[in-house]
Image (cartoon, rainbow, N blue to C red):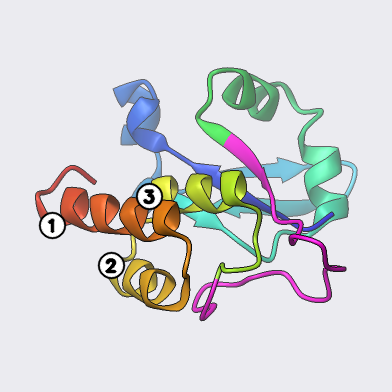
Amino acid sequence: MPIAIAYTPELADPLLLANAPGGAFSVVVPSEGKLLTLAPGNNFDIDEELWQRAQDLPAVSDMLSSRLLEVIDLSLQGEKVTETPAAGVASIANVEKRAALRLIAHSREEKQLQTWHDADERIEIRNACKRRLADLQEGKG
């Protein structure tokens, strides 16, 4: 199942954020010897095996339960997933509505939101993009 990981650092303890360069969250996954880094907002192209192992780490588990991290299922409506949407994806039109709304809520990129708005015919998605764009433009980021 393709996923996106949404990271919402503004929900975190300010002391945690003070130690996070650029607001990113990084954790070493010992079993893999790899670093998992998540930027604020939506993170696509996540190594699913690395993510599976990372979820067992106490820091990641705590962030999931406190909603600092949210896993968004990118399954497509009535289609087999052939490709995970990535930064710069032209459309979320085939992503299920609930997942699309979560992606919009966590997006911090105005250009991406406008692209999604223009490419989607669902009124709920278009309205959510408009609201999120307005929030970003008003600094409610």
Q: Does residue 43 lie above or below 92 as drawn?
A: above
Q: Does residue 4 lie above or below 79 as drawn?
A: above
Q: Are marks 2 and 3 in contact (CB under 8 Å)?
A: no
Residue 111 quadrant = bottom left
Q: Report the Cα–Cα distance between label 3 and label 1.
A: 24 Å
Q: Is 16 on the left-hand or right-hand side of 36? A: left
Which residue is label 1 attached to?
Answer: 137
Q: Say which label, 2 or 3, has the lower sequence index.
A: 3
Front residue of 77 and 70: 77
Foreground label between 3 and 1: 1
> Picture coordinates of residue 7 (x, y %)?
49, 42
Which residue is label 3 attached to?
Answer: 21
Report the span colored magenta.
70-91
Q: Is 31 on the left-hand or right-hand side of 28? A: right
Front residue of 47 and 118: 118
Foreground label between 2 and 3: 2
> Picture coordinates of residue 38 (x, y %)?
55, 51
Q: Say which label, 3 or 1, has the lower sequence index.
A: 3
Q: Secondary structure at mark 3?
A: helix
Three-letter amino acid code at the position of disc 1: Gln
Three-letter amino acid code at the position of disc 2: Glu
Which residue is label 2 attached to?
Answer: 110
Q: Tell me the tag on residue 70.
A: none
